[in-house]
Amino acid sequence: MVRPVTSGVVPEGLSTPSTLVIADRLERNLASMASFAATIRTALRPHAKTHKCVEIANKQMALGARGISVATVGEAEALTAGARSASAGSAVDDVFVCYPLWPAGDLVDRLSVLAERVRVRVGSDSPDAVERLSALAGRIGVMIEVDCGLGRSGVPPSGALAVARAAERCGLAVDGVFTFPGHGYRPGAAEAAAADEVAALDEAAGILNEQGFDGLERSGGSTPTARKSTAGGLTESRPGVYVFNDAQQVELGVAGFADVALVVAATVVSRPARGRIVLDSGSKVLGADRPAWSTGHGRLLDWPDARIVGLWEHHAVVSLDGPVPSLGEVVAVLPNHVCSAVNLVPEMLVVDDGHIVDAWPVAARGANR
Ligand SMILES: Cc1ncc(COP(=O)(O)O)c(C=O)c1O
């Protein structure tokens, strides 16, 4: 019979489902990645799509991050509001949109406004996309995306030169190359993915160097690979999930249960059969991501043997043997993919020692363009 662990993170009397940030764990995760990056002399540019929150971005900046990474111009806008102004607001003054933007609609105008208040770099993987940015020459930098094995966006390293030449023709600065080693998101795959990312960035940067492009950034990173990096491999690292961790990181062995800093507090609303309980945290609050290798739709912080085996919009069906939480008990759920869970709520309640101490808006919630 497996006894439950008692973390004591969930405050009494909470309405559920509620998305909670566990303050001391968050601080620990932030500080530990900042210090790791400093040890290997790599600039940290955390991916803010995980938290979408000005308060957390400011903490990252205070711990020495050079700026933030984002996936969309909308995230950049939301997370830099008030930057460089005298009034309180974001402390972020440097943003990298690490996504192969297709500049159309209002995107160039919005990038132009953004570049007036913060330093801006954008990702690109084609001469055509770069040419559409030419109105921003002298005002933003281009980072060329290369594929290191994920098979998503990004040219092969040998294709970086054509993109760089297009930027040069338009008068746009080529600031460097970047990649995402997302094929490290499988059990046992992170080490090889980290090696692939360095190899692809080295190859692309080497080709560009030979053609006279110098001072190039080599930007990589994901949470599973971040700590596999060594000095001299990358110039910049972009992990995002590390701030909170989630069930995926636990099952990959990247984090332990005690490193998970975001949970969804959920009530046991039904115990319909032996070994089965039902929680009020469905896919509308946990998110529905489920990689093929995962053991279910999420985990329970204090019940390590429990698995969420079924997920509906407002029901999470949990399977576990032995003692089970009582009807009406509030448990802490680890979403599989924390970035998706954060994007589903307007604010995160901050808890410290079992008490709510703050509520942080998810400022860039839904900022998908
Ligand atoms: C381009 C890019 N960079 C960095 C990251 C951050 O990696 P992780 O989510 O593993 O922290 C992501 C995540 O999707 C990404 O797509």
Image (cartoon, grey):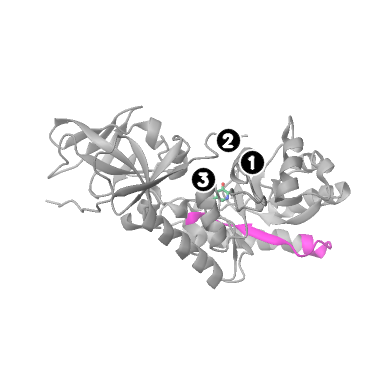
Question: Label 1 near label 3: C-beta < 8 Å?
Answer: no
Query: Could you give the CA–CA distance between mark 1 and mark 2, rounded to whole angstroms?
Result: 9 Å
The kind of residue on which mark 2 rests is Ala
Query: Could you give the CA–CA distance between mark 3 and mark 1, rounded to whole angstroms?
Result: 12 Å
- Label 2 belongs to which residue? 367
Between disc 1 and disc 2, the foreground one is 1
Q: How crowded is mark 2: few (under 14 residues within 10 Å), some or many (20 or more)?
A: some
Question: Label 2 near label 1: C-beta < 8 Å?
Answer: yes
14 shown above or below 225: above
The kind of residue on which mark 1 rests is Glu
Q: Which element is circle 2 on? A: loop
Q: How crowded is mark 1: few (under 14 residues within 10 Å), some or many (20 or more)?
A: many
Viewer-proximal residue among 348 and 163:
348
* Of the image marks 3 and 1, the number of the one nearer the N terminus: 3
Q: Can residue 291 be seen in this view?
A: no
What residue do we see at 19% from left, 42% from top? 320
Image-based side of 237 in relation to 5, left or right = right
What residue do we see at 51% from left, 60% from top? 226
What residue do we see at 84% from left, 63% from top? 212
The reply to whether the residue tagged 3 has its Cβ within 8 angstroms of ligand 1 is no
Q: Is residue 167 visible?
A: yes
Which residue range is magenta in the image? 208-223
Q: Residue 53 carries which label?
A: 3
Give the image location of residue 164, x and y in percent. 79, 52
Q: Which residue occupies the extreme top position in the image? A: 313
Whether residue 213 is in magenta: the answer is: yes
Give the image location of residue 272, x and y in percent. 15, 28
